[in-house]
Amino acid sequence: MTAERYRRLRQVLECRQPDLTIVTDNVHKSRNLSAIVRTADAAGIGTMYCAMPDKDYKAFRGTAMGSHTWVAVRRQPDVTAALTPLKAQGYQVLATHLASDSVDYREADYTRPTVILLGAEKLGVSEAGCVLADAHITIPMRGMVQSFNVSVAAGIILAEAERQRQNAGMYSQRRIDDASYQRILFEWAQP
Amino acid sequence: MTAERYRRLRQVLECRQPDLTIVTDNVHKSRNLSAIVRTADAAGIGTMYCAMPDKDYKAFRGTAMGSHTWVAVRRQPDVTAALTPLKAQGYQVLATHLASDSVDYREADYTRPTVILLGAEKLGVSEAGCVLADAHITIPMRGMVQSFNVSVAAGIILAEAERQRQNAGMYSQRRIDDASYQRILFEWAQP
Ligand SMILES: C[S@@+](CC[C@H](N)C(=O)[O-])C[C@H]1O[C@@H](n2cnc3c(N)ncnc32)[C@H](O)[C@@H]1O
Ligand SMILES: C[S@@+](CC[C@H](N)C(=O)[O-])C[C@H]1O[C@@H](n2cnc3c(N)ncnc32)[C@H](O)[C@@H]1O
């Protein structure tokens, strides 16, 4: 490990956002999940959750790329198991949902502890996910197609979260606690 | 064709942005190109250009999904052939490039006639593409991974273009000329 590399690991940890995360609600295509993990890393997300069957998760881990080294991806059997502990910790759940009562995604406040709930490729966010949501957000679409690819939608929403958190100075001071910082730095610095 | 469907076709054409487009610089994976076409449609792009070998383009057309009905995708043999006529028409070329002289993508003015130049999965924007660019734009990344998936990057940049054009009222009045409007409406309304 070069000094430069070590400096970079520390710099990235200084930007991690312990109160911003993603829950995927039965997103099952490995390439979509991989693109979401990569995008999560870029926004400073350190841990995310995939509600999906164990079989699909194993297939996903089999194809996993580099970004999985940097983001902890935790499987949960369903969306209720994934969201309940986060809600108990005070996270707001923003379901990405093309419903009539959805608000423009730029109206949400992403500086609060936030879960972005992403839906399955065909079915979108499940009924159970919608019930647990605090708000429904949607990205406006001006064309004939009715939805974005899920990883593209994740990128657009996380870019807005990043913008708000940057404006609030949330990338300019360390946000994870000392114990987590030391533990993750140790893990990452392993040869 | 129901009256509702016909109304929707017209509504989408009212939002089309004839002075916003994408050029892909040897992006070769069909699933990335498909996601880019879908995202282009959502931002109101009616025509985009893929600089790529004919063989790869044929493979892409073979897998093409619904969004190709709505966005005209034109192949060009290389990025110079794609960009030169657009530059002659006064388009600015924004290369999406992770260079040291790149500016934050939110600093660009997307209300001007604009080409967003997207680079290949492995190699990024080519030398020829960089030379023809008026500016280099980059999406900030806070993590360990060095780049986004190209379709995710396209989504993030087009969402900013959409935001600026919405604020400028560019989706509130028809922007394509009568002849194009009538021609495309006729094509779309074919059974
Ligand atoms: C292909 S879409 C699912 C479409 C599904 N038919 C539906 O009605 O929800 C997959 C996921 O991408 C995200 N997504 C796609 N387009 C979106 C949009 N315009 N706004 C917000 N999220 C979107 C959501 O998480 C969605 O569940
Ligand atoms: C996987 S990246 C290419 C990475 C390549 N190694 C490079 O250095 O350019 C594929 C394309 O996605 C777009 N892209 C990815 N990350 C980006 C970022 N942070 N800012 C702007 N564009 C990006 C660019 O069009 C890029 O050419």
Image: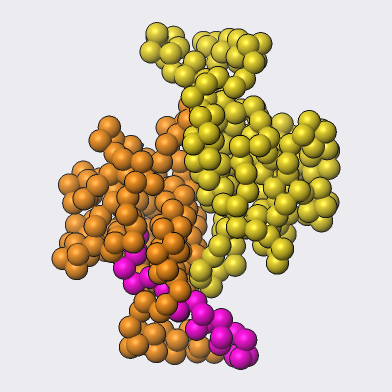
Chain colours: A orange, B yellow
- A77 and B150: which one is in front? B150
Q: At x 34% / y 72%, what residue is drawn?
A: A18
Residue A86 is covered by the magenta coloring: no
Residue B62 vs residue A35, the one in the foreground: A35
When the figure is inspected, residue A106 is found, relative to residue B191, above or below; the finding is below
In this rendering, does residue A48 appear at all? Answer: yes
Q: Is residue A19 magenta?
A: yes
Q: Specify the quadrant of the image occupied by residue B114.
A: top right
Q: Is residue A36 visible?
A: no
Q: The N terminus of chain B lies in which quarter of the figure?
A: top left
Residue at horizontal 69 percent and vertical 40 percent from the top:
B115
Q: Taking A125 as reference, is B135 left or right?
A: right
Image position of B51 (left or right of B178): right
Give how far across and how far down residue A84 sits, in percent: 17, 62
Tell me if residue A7 comes above or below residue B172 in the rendering.
below
Q: Residue at x 71, y 31 (%)?
A: B74
User: Please, is residue A103 above or below residue A33 in the view?
Assistant: above
Between residue B128 and residue A37, name the one nearer to us.
B128
**In this picture, which residue range is highlighted in magenta?**
A1-22
Image quadrant of residue B62? top right
Query: Picture coordinates of residue B141 (x, y %)?
Result: 54, 65
Q: Residue B60's spot in the image, x, y percent?
A: 65, 38
Tell me: B172 left or right of B2. right
Return the x and y of residue A148 as percentages of the image width and height: 46, 41
